[in-house]
Amino acid sequence: MASQEIIFAGFGGQGILSMGKFLAYAGMDANKNVSW
């Protein structure tokens, strides 16, 4: 399986935290092991 890298940048933190949570939920929906 090929790995993928996603880089997010932001200021203040709320958008970055929300995007991380969104990606974690997407991984769980795809039956992947995730940590956040």
Image: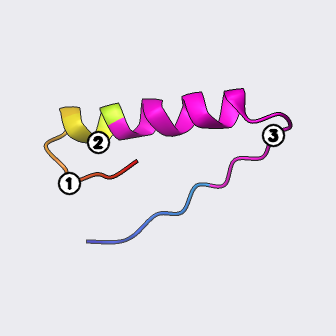
**C-alpha separation, residue under disc 1 versus residue under disc 2:** 7 Å
- Asked whether residue 12 is drawn in magenta, I would say yes
Q: Residue at x 83, y 33 (%)?
A: 12
Splitting the image into 4 quarters, where does residue 27 fall?
Answer: top left
Q: Amino acid at mark 3?
A: Gly
Residue interval drawn in magenta: 7-24
Q: Is residue 32 left or right of residue 14?
A: left
Mark 1–mark 2 CB contact (< 8 Å)? yes
**Label annotation for residue 27:** 2
Percent x, y for residue 10?
81, 40
Q: Residue at x 60, y 35 (%)?
A: 17
| Residue type, mark 2 in image | Gly
Image height of 18 relative to 32, above or below: above
Q: In this image, 29 relative to 17: left or right?
A: left
Main secondary structure type of the part rendered in magenta: helix
Residue 1, located in which quarter of the rendered image? bottom left
Spatial CA distance of label 2 from label 3 is 22 Å
Crowdedness near tag 1: few (<14), some (14–19) or many (≥20) residues, C-alpha within 10 Å: few
The image position of residue 32, as x and y in percent, is 19, 50
Of marks 2 and 3, which one's residue comes earlier in the chain?
3
Q: To which residue does mark 3 refer?
A: 10
Please tell me the numbered disc located at residue 33.
1
Callout 3 environment at 10 Å: few (<14), some (14 to 19), or many (20+)?
few
User: Residue 2's quadrant in the figure?
Assistant: bottom left
Q: Magenta includes 18?
A: yes
